[in-house]
Amino acid sequence: MSNHRTEPTMPSASLKSRLLPFLAVAGPGLVVMLADTDAGSVITAAQSGARWGYKLLALQLILIPILYVVQELTVRLGLFTARGHGELIREHFGARWAWLSVATLLVSCLGALITELSGIAGVGALYGIPLPVSVGITLAFLMVVVITGSYRSVERVAVAIGLFELAFLYVAVVARPDPIEMLRGMASVPLGDRSYLYLVAANIGAVIMPWMVFYQQSAVVDKGLKPINLKAARVDTALGAVVTQAIMAAVLISAAATFGRAGGQGALDTVQDIARALTPYLGEVNGRLLFALGMLGAALVATIVVALTAAWGLGEVMGYKRSLEHHPREAPWFYLVFTVVLVAGGILVSSGINLVELSVGVEVMNALLLPIVLGFLYTLSRRALPEAMRLKGPYAVVVAVTITLTAGLGVYGGISGLLGP
C-alpha cells in the first residue's frame, strides 16, 4: 500500500489569481455599456416592443458584436497613445476638425442629459415627487460624488448604480414571452415601412453613441491603464456589450409581451405608460418599484458618464486640466464644465417636453452623427496607433464594412422616418 498522497488542487486560488488582475482593470467598459442602456435607450426599446412586437429583437443581438468592434478601437487608442479622443483628433487632423468632433459630442451629450434627467423626473412622478425636487436631489448627489471622489471611487459608484438595470431582466422573465412569437417576429423585417426604419435608426443610435467613444478612451487614460492591460480591457468591453444588449432586449421583450396582452394599441407616451406596460403581472407596487430601480440605474449612471464626457472632451480640445485625480482647485475648468452641463440639462428638463418623443428623436440624432464619429475613429485607428496595433489587413476591411453599413443604415433609417410616409 502506497503512502504517497496527492496534494489537493486549489481551483479557488487559481481563479482568484486570474480574477483579481481583471477586476483591477475592469470598469471603463462596463460603466460605459451600462450608461449605454440609458433612459433614452430604455424608452426606445420599450417603444420598439410596443409598436413592432419582436420585429426589432434580432437587431439588438446583431448590435452586440458591432458595439464591441467600435468600443474596442477606443480601448486600443487609449491604451497605446495615452490620449483622449478629442486630443488625438486635434493632433492628427488639426484644431478645426477637433472642434467639429467636440461639437457633435456636446450636442449628443446635451440631448442625452435631457433624456436622463427627464427619465429621473418621470420616476419621481410615479411616487408623487415634484420635478424640481427629483432633479435637484439628483444634481446635488452627482456633484458630490464627482467633486469629492477619485476616478476609481466614481467608477465604483457608477457600476453599483448601473447594476439596478438588471431588474429589467427579471421583468422580461416574469412577462413569459412566447418563444414561437419571438421567432416569428425576429424573422419578419418590414424594411419598406418608414416608421419601422425610424425605430431601426433610433435603436442603432441608442446603442452606438458619440459620447461612448469619447468616454471610454478618456476613462482608460484617466484610470492609468497601460498596453499590458489590453486583454483584460477587451474582456471588460465584451462583457459590457453583452450586458447592455441583454438589458435592451429584455425591455423590448417585456414591452412586446405585456403590452400585447394588455390590449395596447402600440403607443407609449409617458414614463408612467411605460411602467404600466412593462410590469402588469408584477403587481402595482412591485412592478412600479422594479421599473423605478431599473430606470434610475440607467439614468443615473448615464448622467455621470455623459457629463464627465462633455468635460473631458472639451478639455481635450481646449487643453485645460481634466482628470478626476485632480482636486477642483487644480482643475477648475474641468469641474466647472461638468457642473454647468449638469445644471443646463436640469434647466432644459423643466421645459415640459414630451420625454418619449424626445428620447427616440435623440437616439435618431445619434444615428445621424455616426458617419462623423465612426469616420474619425476608424481613421485614427489606422494612423495614431503603433504599427503592431494599427488597424490593418483583413480585419480593417471587416471593420470598415461593419461601420459603413451600420452608419449607413442609421442615416437611411433616420432620414426615411423624418421624411414621413
Image (cartoon, rainbow, N blue to C red):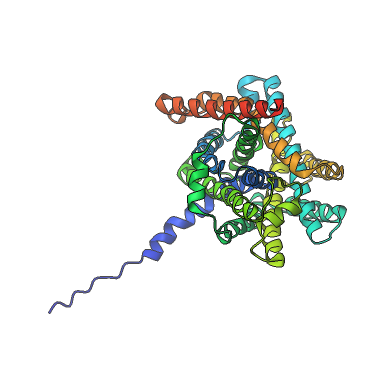
Please tell me whether residue 176 is drawn above or below residue 181 in the rendered image: below
Position of 103 with respect to 14 (left or right) is: right
In the picture, residue 262 is in which quadrant? bottom right
**Mark count:** 0
Position of 292 with respect to 183 (left or right) is: right
Residue at far bottom of view: 1
Q: Looking at the image, which residue is at 67% across and 44% down?
A: 47
Q: Looking at the image, which residue is at 61% across and 51% down?
A: 251
In the picture, residue 356 is in which quadrant? top right
Quarter of the figure with the N terminus: bottom left
In the picture, residue 331 is in which quadrant? top right
- The percent position of residue 264, horizontal first and vertical second, equals 68, 50
Quarter of the figure with the C terminus: top right
The one of 262 and 277 positioned closer to us in this rendering:
262
- The percent position of residue 408, horizontal first and vertical second, equals 58, 25
Q: Looking at the image, which residue is at 49% across and 40% down?
A: 187
- The percent position of residue 248, horizontal first and vertical second, equals 59, 47
Residue at far left of view: 1
The one of 202 and 370 positioned closer to us in this rendering:
202
The one of 240 and 84 positioned closer to us in this rendering:
240
Position of 414 with respect to 271 (left or right) is: left
Q: Can residue 35 be seen in this view?
A: yes
- The percent position of residue 95, horizontal first and vertical second, equals 70, 21
Please tell me whether residue 376 is drawn above or below residue 264 in the rendered image: above
Q: Can residue 239 be seen in this view?
A: no
